[in-house]
Image: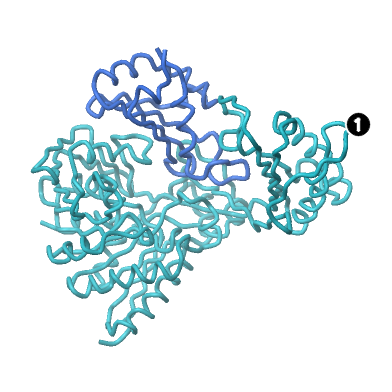
Amino acid sequence: MVRVLIPTGALGLAYDRDALSRGVANRPDIIAVDGGSTDSGPSYLGRGVSKYSRSTTKAEWRDLMRARAEAGVPLVIGTAGTCGADSAVDWLYEITTELAAELGQKVRVARLYSGQAPEMVAGALRAGRITPLSGAPSVDEDTLRSCTNIVALAGAEQIRAALDTGADIVIAGRTTDTAIIAALPIAASCDPGAAWHGAKVGECGALATTNPASGVIQIDFDETGFTLEPLGRTARATPYTVSAHMLYENTDPFILYEPGGHLDVTGSRYSALDDRRVRVEGSVWVPGPYTVKLEGARVAGYQVVSLTLLRDRRYVENARAWAEDVASRCRKVAMERTGLTASEFTIEMRLIGQDATLGLLETGRVTPVEVGVLCIVTAPSEAQAAEIGKILNPYLLHHALTEDEPMPTFAFPFSPAEMTRGAVYEFCLHHILALDDPMAAFRLEVTEIGHG
Amino acid sequence: MAELGQIAQKVRSKNAGPFWLTVDIFCGDPVTFARVSGALDSARVAALYRVAEAEMRRFDIADLNVVKFSFPRPTVQGTAADRDMHGAGWAVLLEEMEIG
């Protein structure tokens, strides 16, 4: 039996500290926590940085390093620093080094790097070892070379290699959400179907229970299945909360692809052991070719945004016509002044209160009391975006619906009115890379830090 | 006729990675599930999100009283044209859809 303690769905999201103490007292074999996801968008991978605050990350990581020392078992984090780029692994390693000194711990740390050199990935594309997944954008070698970061998602094999170094702490770059939880049970010959299924249910911490905010759960894996137990006092796992979790952020609720195969939960059986623990058996692991998924991000332009508020009823009722008139006048002026062609930049007007969330898909039709006009300029350079943002400004302040009316003035909440957003990134890979050796696209570095 | 959001327990949409969106309709009980599953026309749902019906995957899961749709995201997550980074806002289109 292998017991995995999962403190939270992601480091930085907070969790119930008493529940963590109970988890440590239950003598886990490993503490596993996720550190990231693509869910907050491409900017984090593009820049190779964390979404969460350094101080929050350090405070929570301090708790987990203490819990690890008390439990005397490995602590592993996957997708460190939101995106799992090499720079994000280094960022968490630096925090770990500070904490080891502050806590008086001497620890062996394995860093698992998932970053891929664009030139190497371009070579793999030429060699036919890269395959697009459904819905993938088309890529060529230039696309790959323009990426600021490319990562491969490590699976259980790479996490196991990191654990096999005897590390107290594993700081992994991009991994699948599940790999950090599944690796040790698989290495200990638990049922692989149970290992991957339990890992999927557990990867969001207590999200698969009645009290998601409590964070902490433990999962016991064995030769025939897994048992999930939430550790928050009021949290309960039920066959429904556990089985429904396969729906979450998953295209197919019965199949989950991982490096080296896929999980099939079509025949899984869920049973309540009592009013808070759930047992799952019958999940199947189907081995397949060894592939790892790739993620990449690149700069797709630079943005400047402005926000103007329309409160005058006549302007609210005619907001779309007004906004499009402003945008089309500014497009003409912007082309004359910057030399850009119409296809090289965009001025987009999103009407907050009307259709800013859904755009053309919006079906609701209610006249709001006011409309926020969010003007988004996207241009090839930061300087051009700034220029166009400033060209927009007088129109946003004073543009009238008709020529024969007094000049209106609209509300700007800020000075300056323009907000520079910097580079906007885009995800440009949704592909898999075939590997002969799981470690071929990853590298490990092991060091001893701190003093005890 | 009634809005789906008033019949179902919850409608949730979420990214399934940057390139796909998945929408889960939690019906809450078998009677509601049977009604929703029977009344929901996949072609109408595809039109609501302006995706090709052939690209849409549908799962009617009686064990969970859930109807689930997955399809390529109307805009790729985080591109300049994207309006909803986490994809959670798209659920309202189904919530507000009238069904029999």
A416 vs A56: above or below:
above
Nearer the observer, A350 or A37: A350
The reply to whether residue A119 is in sight is no
Residue type (three-letter) at the residue carrying disc 1: Asp
Counting the numbered discs, the total is 1
Nearer the observer, A304 or A91: A304
A158 vs A177: above or below:
below
A107 vs A113: above or below:
below
Looking at the figure, which quarter contains the N terminus of chain A? Answer: bottom left
**Coordinates of residue A322 in the picture (x, y in percent):** 77, 34
Q: Which residue is mark 1?
A: A404
Looking at the figure, which quarter contains the C terminus of chain A? Answer: bottom left
**Coordinates of residue A209 in the picture (x, y in percent):** 24, 45
Residue positioned 12% across, 38% down in the render: A271
**Coordinates of residue B10 in the picture (x, y in percent):** 35, 31
Say which element carries label 1.
loop
Q: Colour of chain B?
A: blue
Chain identity of mark 1: A
Chain in cyan in the render: A
Residue positioned 55% across, 25% down in the render: B50
**Label 1 environment density (alpha carbons within 10 Å; few <14, some 14–19, many ≥20):** few
Nearer the observer, A110 or A239: A239
Q: Is residue A402 left or right of residue A426?
A: right
Q: Is residue B16 left or right of residue A415?
A: left
Q: Quadrant of residue A245?
A: top left
Q: Quadrant of residue A12?
A: bottom left
Nearer the observer, B37 or A400: A400
The reply to whether residue A130 is in sight is yes
Residue positioned 76% across, 51% down in the render: A389
